[in-house]
Image: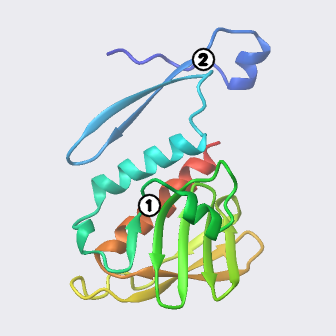
Amino acid sequence: MILPKLVGTRSQLQKDKCPPVVVYLLFYSKSSLFLLELNSKSNLKNPESIRNIVIKAIERSVMDVETWKYSRIVQQPFDELKQKFKLDPSELPLIEVQGESKHTLITTRRIIEKTEGSFSVVEFEDIDDVIYGLFKGQIDHPVLSTFRIVDLYGDQIDFQLETGKAAVGLIKSVNMVRKLVADR
């Protein structure tokens, strides 16, 4: 397959009234390779597409999802989580970590943690750095630990994560959403 060459920026092409541009994105991992075709009229950054891309990336990189103790990939229906975390109508949940006193949710727009009536929230657009710390732990004996978000204003916010195999899913989701949001 021959991939087209991009001949200008989107604003230049819109200003010059050029026809829609076709862009090909190549995704690969050890076990799969696929090509995603996008044209300038499609909306790659809508919540459904972000969710689909992130969930597929998680599924390709994690091990033994059924052994996760505190974490899970969120499946439909989302109504209960949307209500509990007060999500926007277009915001979709990806991964949740449920501890005894904290409940953390990674969505297509934010990281939210609910603790006894209070919320800690950070938007992906506001994240400057993520510090995962010692997320490996003992692989076969997961515990709840924390990871730290540093936002653009220098504030540091800690969220819970499950150590071991489940940490890979959470880390992959945070990193992928950050990348997709930054590419908007």
What residue does disc 1 label? 74
State the residue in front, 35 or 94.
Answer: 94
Give coordinates of residue 3: x percent, y percent. 41, 18
Give coordinates of residue 7: x percent, y percent. 60, 17
Q: In the rendered image, which quarter contains the C terminus? A: top right
Q: Where 146 falls versus 66 (above or below)? A: below
Q: Residue at x 34, y 73 (%)?
A: 166
State the residue in front, 45 or 22.
Answer: 45
Q: Where 142 falls versus 113 (above or below)? A: below
Give coordinates of residue 35: x percent, y percent. 36, 29
Q: Residue at x 69, y 24 (%)?
A: 10
Q: Which mark is residue 9?
A: none
Number of other residues with Cα within 10 Å of mark 1, as a class: few under 14, some 14 to 19, many 20 or more? some
Number of labels in the image equals 2
State the residue in front, 102 or 153.
Answer: 102
The reply to whether residue 128 is visible in this rendering is: no
What residue does disc 2 label? 7
Number of other residues with Cα within 10 Å of mark 2, as a class: few under 14, some 14 to 19, many 20 or more? few
